[in-house]
Image: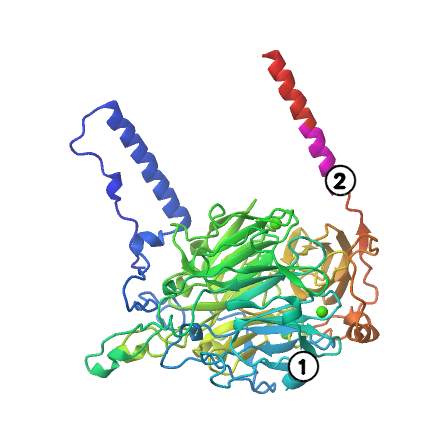
Amino acid sequence: MTRQGPGPDDSARPDRGGRATPRRRRVLVFLSIALGMTVILYVSVGVPQGLRRRSPSPSASATPFRLEPARDIGKTRANPTVPVPPSPFRFAEVARESGITFVHASGMTEAKHFPTAYGSGVAMFDADGDGRMDLYFATATRLPVGNSRTGPNRFYRNLGGGRFVDATERSGLGFQGYCQGLVVGDYDNDGDPDVYLCNYGSNVLYRHDGSGRFVDVTREARVEGGGWSTAGAFLDYDNDGRLDLYVARFGHWKLPDDDRFCGGMKNPARPELEKTRIYCTPRYVRPARHFLYHNNGDGTFTDATERAGVGRSDGRGLGVVAADLNDDGRIDLYVANDTCPNFLFLNRGDGTFEDATDSSGAGYDPAGNVRAGMGVDAEDVDGDDRPDLFVTNYFDEPNALFSNRGGGQFIERTRTSGMMHDSLPWVGWGCALADFDNDGWPDCFVTNGHVDDNLHLFNVANPYAQPALLHHNVGRGRFELATRLAGAYFDADHVGRGVAHGDIDDDGDIDLVVNHKDAPPALLRNDTATRNGWIRVRLVGSRSNRDGIGAVVTVTVGDRTIVRHRKGGASYASAHDPRLLIGIGRAASASSVTIRWPSGQVDRLSDIAAGSDLTIREGPTVPASSPTRPAGTGFEDARRALGNLRSNGGHLPHGGRPDSSIPKPHFRSNSFLWISMAIGILAAIASVIGCNVASVAS
Ligand SMILES: [Ca+2]
Ligand SMILES: [Ca+2]
Ligand SMILES: [Ca+2]
Ligand SMILES: [Ca+2]
């Protein structure tokens, strides 16, 4: 480590010409306290980045993305002098042999139009109701849109047996244009997944028509967005049982006005290169307000951004995750922003959010500086039952882990997590906090890749293609680099962007898909040998949104609890397998699986054997006051005919067994809410009486 520690602060120097007075003593006491606090801050959260080096100012006329060579290349493959233990993981890259022929196009040319640096995402969902995860790849195009034909987005049906077939035309998902982010959710609660595209230009909402075809309903639904959208999440923020939609936007960038020249780098041997463009810094792009669309339940949405209190316009948004982050039963929002604060919006439960960006500790680095937030995730990595936050960042910035302290408070503990050093050299994008060996501890995958492909022309040591990172969580949020011998994919360099995870081959382990910029994607089949067991949970909400987004699943194994969230969004511009595959280690069974639904309903199942593949429906009864649902479609009927959505049956490898004895969810009356309210009212009355008594007594 050659990083420079905090230096003396000018304002903290004693007054040399001062008088030896009580005032001076007070100043010295104050300074001692300030120094002590600085040391405590230093020890607890690491070297304040802002004290090392300030981010570049956008005032220079030709400021590119930062170009300083990474001084410290960690113990990743680039630094063979530091030994890395063999990985416990094994992944085989099988995209091509699986029949996936998609090749991404970013639209990058020598003109380096700014949005073409960002690549696209990938989505994993079951589009045809056969229980297998299909794949949908987004692609972009040259700007302005329409001048060249690249793409389209490609959709592949999963046929099982490791085979995929291109079904783009039949599915109706063949969008042609600049598509960056994919969002998946059943917004009309009819039992099939709908898809939203975050584009440069108008966004697109595809409604699943029930027969496996997707129909563009953007105009009727009124969710065009506009400008440059990057990523999003479905979430039911007002808990009316219908999925609303948050859409992050990067900022205002238009041709020709924003086509600024950045470059001017010199190579004495090749003077002609001085006119070569590289991408400008994001700080040139004026951020745009993001969108929160409220689902009206009739196929239309209303822009509720301002009403809900999330109308900040200082975030160049790239990653969105929705989950209950402060354990109050209401779904919250965290947004990774590029060279801007990361937004944390805590749900108040009345249709509005509290902006906790500044107060939570998750908005900035420990010194109060912004970073280049790209991908994002939320999962309990240290086993305290609270979801921690993870953000991928630019090179010379660590991928950040914000530990959840409860009550909406976070503290960055990247350094002590073991993930700081290895992430510093690389530009991080899509990510996954997912348990790849089913030991119950979420591991971490990050895809990397620079924005500029031509820095070598100027002898700048920032490679365009970069190695992916894979960290093994060895317990309680301690991570170790685990790329050596993990597979040939980890020995090569890639220009990664979107990442989705899920169990592609239904063999009980989490696989990965990576959308590479201007290259074929990777399908990383998890071949890790482990005797750890798992339980799979697919949620079907009734009072809550049908996808169950916002639900919290607690698995009890011995004296250990494993808490997982059914999240909206996550990663970078991508959508994961909606099922929760929960590793339970060597245990033969879990003593209980508890689901806390967004409605407040709590369902509990007991004695669930390892290898159980569960579909859990919310509560046995649906109150008459619940939101009305559209009638079931043919797709849902077909799936019902297939047998309760493959519940407890179908593929159960790894020694799992079809389990007809799995108990039905037991309804547990949720009266604690009423009791809490009653206690609250009584407490309020008591305090008023107490105040009156006190004032009378005085
Ligand atoms: Ca639907
Ligand atoms: Ca919450
Ligand atoms: Ca693990
Ligand atoms: Ca698998």
Q: Position of residue 345 (x, y in %)?
A: 55, 51
* Image height of 422 relative to 386, above or below: below
Q: Position of residue 616 (x, y in %)?
A: 76, 62
Dominant SS type (magenta): helix
Image quarter of residue 240: bottom right
**Residue that extends furthest to the left in the rendered view of this protein:** 17
* Image height of 170 relative to 283, above or below: below
For mark 1, give the secondary structure.
helix
Residue sitting at x 71%, y 32%: 681
Range of magenta residues: 673-684
Q: Does residue 473 appear in the picture of this structure?
A: no
Residue 675 magenta-highlighted: yes
Circle 2: residue type? Trp
Q: Which residue is mark 1?
A: 171
Circle 1: residue type? Ser
For mark 2, give the secondary structure.
helix
Image quarter of residue 159: bottom right
Toward the viewer: 445 or 116? 116
Discs 2/1, front: 1
Say left or right for 138 vs 73.
right
Q: Quadrant of the N terminus?
A: bottom left
Query: Does any atom of ligand 1 lie closer than 8 Å to the CB of label 1?
Result: no
Residue sitting at x 59%, y 51%: 307
Q: Residues within 10 Å of mark 2 (few under 14, many from 20)?
A: few
Q: Which residue is mark 2?
A: 674
Q: Does residue 324 appear in the picture of this structure?
A: yes
Q: Position of residue 638 (x, y in %)?
A: 81, 76
Residue 406 magenta-highlighted: no
State the separation of the CA atoms marked 2 and 1. 47 Å
Image quarter of residue 274: bottom left
